[in-house]
Amino acid sequence: MERTYSVCCGVDVGKSSHHFAAIIPATGELVFDGKVEQSESGIRDALLSVSLFGSPVVVVDQPGNMAALLFAVCDDMGIAKGFITPRAMSKAIEMYGGDIKTDAHNALVIAEVSSSLPKLVKPVSEKSALYLRLSALMSYDRELTLESTRATNRLHDLLLSVSPALETHLEGKRVQSNFSLMVLSRYGGPAGLKKAGRGNVRRWLRSRKGMGEAALRRLDDLFEAIGRQSVTIAGSEYVEELIKQEASFLLTVLASRKKVAESRDELLSQMPEARLLMSLPGLGAVTCATFLAEVGDISRFPNASKLASYAGLAPKVRQSGKTIHSVTKPRGGNRRLKRVLVLSAGKSVQFCEESRAYYERKRSEGHSYGSCMMALARRRLNVMYAMLRDGTAYEKQNG
């Protein structure tokens, strides 16, 4: 942060309380040091006490949900706020005494770093209501994605324990189909299906919405798979009840993901930035939403290189004297953002002639597939930055 402040207030945030440590940069004097309750009145009183010594800046090490109320009170009082990245915080704690781990010590380290090295303090990006809603939606969708993966793996394991043939028949994401989950949640495994009988299951399936002739053919294939096993594995009755529960749970999770996707698309339709970004070949709704949720206002990055560094797509340079000089792939940055940008770059090779030509040129130079994708993602990020900066959609270059 470029501006200098009269007081630097470091805050070690917590769920039920924070620890404040305020320092006057000019003298290094510690003017406030104490535990503050996670409530509006407690935070406001502490900030008023700190403000008596001059214009303060509040700096945290975790600008997430635990700091949301603190930031809201700062905004209401007109107090500047910032944060120190986890890596910088880790290095600072190590320099100030790595064996000590207390809230008071961490708050003091944050205050010391923000007063002596203000360049390490990053501004907290201001997001509009749409950006905040989109960020919350994408965070929720990530949790649902993890939950659906776990539930799918558990369901495969349960099916394998009662009928390997049935598990093979529903391998991979086939078990996530509406047909598979509806049948499994109602009848369980092979014993439940055989007990109900093919005729009864067919009649029930016909009464379900969206289950036509294709579903009936799949049902015949499913009965053929379970018919290959005549023996009953011990404990299968209990397992089949678990299959019903797990299939019902997975149905609910996937339905929630569908609703989240609908809400996401509705939000994107209200954002001019989304329409610009999705004009770029290979960039769909998920990549666009993740980009906007993670980056926020593009104006907080003075140039595309700064954005690339934030996304973890800027090359890492190592140089020392005449013996060491190398440029390697970056390891840091925003991993969620980097992941979707690299995946989007891979997709663009299939749909965009320019991306395909760039990729093939890099491959002909002897670069690995991963390096080519990173380079293409960086190139596309430069284009995305220019599109948002200038407010123009992507146009295919002729020739």
Image: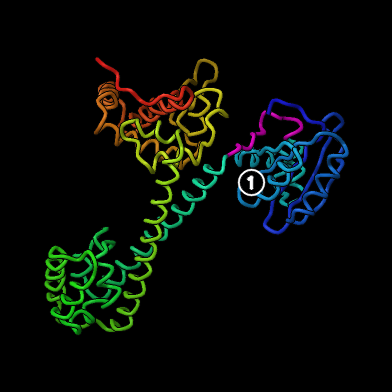
Colour mode of the rendering: rainbow
Q: Position of residue 50 (x, y in %)?
A: 84, 42
Amino acid on which the number 1 mark rests in the picture? Gln
Above or below residue 387? Residue 170 is: below
Q: Position of residue 352 (x, y in %)?
A: 26, 28
The local crowd at label 1, few if under 14, some if 14 to 19, many if 20 or more residues have their Cα within 10 Å, is some
Quarter of image, res 202: bottom left
Above or below residue 319? Residue 331 is: below
Question: Quick check: 116 left or right of 179?
Answer: right
Picture quarter with the N terminus: top right
Instruction: Give the total of numbered labels.
Output: 1
Quarter of image, res 111: top right
Above or below residue 164? Residue 375 is: above
Point out the stretch of residues depicted in magenta. 114-127
Q: Is residue 121 rendered magenta in the image?
A: yes
Q: Position of residue 112 (x, y in %)?
A: 76, 37
Question: Quick check: 85 left or right of 8?
Answer: left
- Residue lying at 12% horizontally and 70% vertically, measured from the top left: 220
Of 233 and 166, the residue lying toward us: 166
Helix, strand, or loop for circle 1?
loop
Question: Quick check: 94 left or right of 391?
Answer: right
Quarter of image, res 235: bottom left
Residue beneath label 1, please?
A: 62
Picture quarter with the C terminus: top left
Question: Quick check: 128 left or right of 3?
Answer: left
Of 125 and 206, the residue lying toward us: 206
Q: Position of residue 148 (x, y in %)?
A: 38, 60
